[in-house]
Image (cartoon, coloured by chain):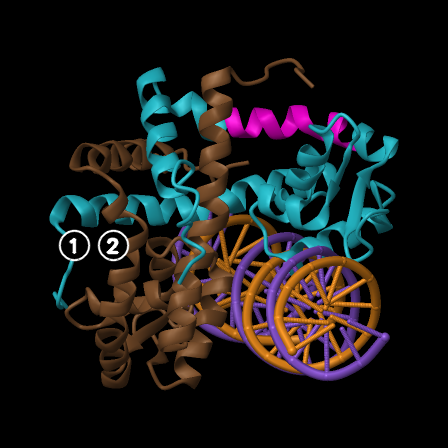
Chain colours: A brown, B cyan, C purple, D orange
DNA sequence: CTAGTTTATTTGAAGCGGCAACTACTTCCG
DNA sequence: CGGAAGTAGTTGCCGCTTCAAATAAACTAG
């Protein structure tokens, strides 16, 4: 199975470990949010993104990009949030194709209620297990993977 | 939003970067496998795990653990692989509750065919973006997160 | 030996996300 | 102006995952 270009031993070890994180961490995070707050990780992220705007309002496309989701996924997420009363949607005044998603007071309250539990989970599963130096490494590596610097080549490409 | 215990600035930065990886990497990986080989990441992993046994055979529970999936998920994955002719299932001779999943020759062939493309994608999205030192860090951090050492506390707990 | 418990796996129902198709609006340009 | 092309967002269909319940076999204790 060592085709054209396989991985080195170090890379293989790192890959297996990373694969474990990729499978298990999101599940554990989602599980806590679902159980304690009836929210999805993705939905939570969307609430966070909206809450960071002082007008609590953002265009769908922009919201999709900042929460790392596809437009169609975002559309459904916001539809669910709206159904739950946590957000509203209205047409943008300037561009009638665009939709502005807005966080409601109930949505903000929901976020405030859900945050401590979620943060505790993140701390428990991630930061409690890492030294400050490792946190720094993690930051560096994660940024390298999501491009962060080089704006034109995200792993969305292929 | 800085409740009981929020995250430090460093931690918050690392967390946002990690969240990006958690959302985008699996999607990009799945997408390639789906497109080029009509396989799921999870299904691919299962094939890999089976292929690493010299008898190409493993118990469901063990297989679930080594591929980081729940039992119910694994059950469906193997059912699909079986339907596609890549695996077979039979009762274990010693314990009739247990099921042994076995990789077929067609499954092995499928894996051999799919591997190069997948590996290339992993290399492109991960290792080409990291220095050897960063690969080492990644390995260390990922292991810390998945416990790897400490057998009794995976993030599956809560 | 038998009832109760634990372990191994599967499955029905329900929810979520992807792809591709579709609507609707805007912009470009002759 | 008027049509082609591009952009924003939604939705139908389908496949995958989860949760909880079901089935079945293997221990365990009396």
Q: Position of residue A123 (x, y in %)?
A: 25, 54
Q: Chain of mark 2?
A: A
Report the span colored magenta.
B110-123
Can you identify the residue that label 1 sits on? B7
Q: Quadrant of the N terminus of chain A?
A: top right
Residue nearest the viewer, comparing A120 with B24: A120
Dot 2 lies on which element? helix
Q: Position of residue A33 (x, y in %)?
A: 38, 69
Distance in Å between CA atoms under marks 1 and 2: 8 Å
Q: Main secondary structure of the magenta part?
A: helix
Which of the 4 quarters of the picture holds residue B157? Answer: bottom left
Q: Position of residue A21 (x, y in %)?
A: 44, 43
Q: Residue at x 41, y 42 (%)?
A: B146
Magenta residue check for B106: no
Residue nearest the viewer, comparing B18 with D30: D30
Can you identify the residue that label 2 sits on? A123
Dot 1 lies on which element? loop
Q: Position of residue A138 (x, y in %)?
A: 28, 36
Q: Is residue A79 visible?
A: yes
Magenta residue check for B114: yes
- Do discs 1 and 2 belong to a common subunit? no
Mark 2 and mark 1 in contact (Cβ < 8 Å)?
yes
């Amino acid at each position: 199975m060592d085709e054209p270009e396989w991985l080195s031993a170090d890379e293989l070890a790192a890959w297996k470990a990373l694969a474990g994180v990729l499978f298990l961490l999101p599940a554990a995070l989602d599980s806590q949010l679902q159980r304690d707050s009836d929210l999805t990780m993705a939905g939570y992220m969307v609430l966070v993104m909206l809450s960071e705007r002082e007008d609590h309002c953002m265009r769908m496309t922009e919201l999709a990009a900042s929460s790392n989701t596809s437009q169609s996924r975002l559309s459904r997420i916001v539809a669910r949030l709206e159904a739950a009363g946590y957000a509203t949607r209205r047409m943008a005044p300037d561009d009638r194709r665009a939709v502005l998603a807005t966080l409601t007071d109930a949505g903000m309250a929901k976020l405030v209620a859900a945050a401590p539990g979620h943060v505790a989970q993140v701390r428990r599963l991630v930061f409690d297990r890492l030294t400050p130096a490792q946190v720094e490494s993690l930051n560096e590596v994660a940024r390298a993977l999501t491009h962060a610097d080089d704006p034109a080549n995200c792993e969305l490409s292929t």
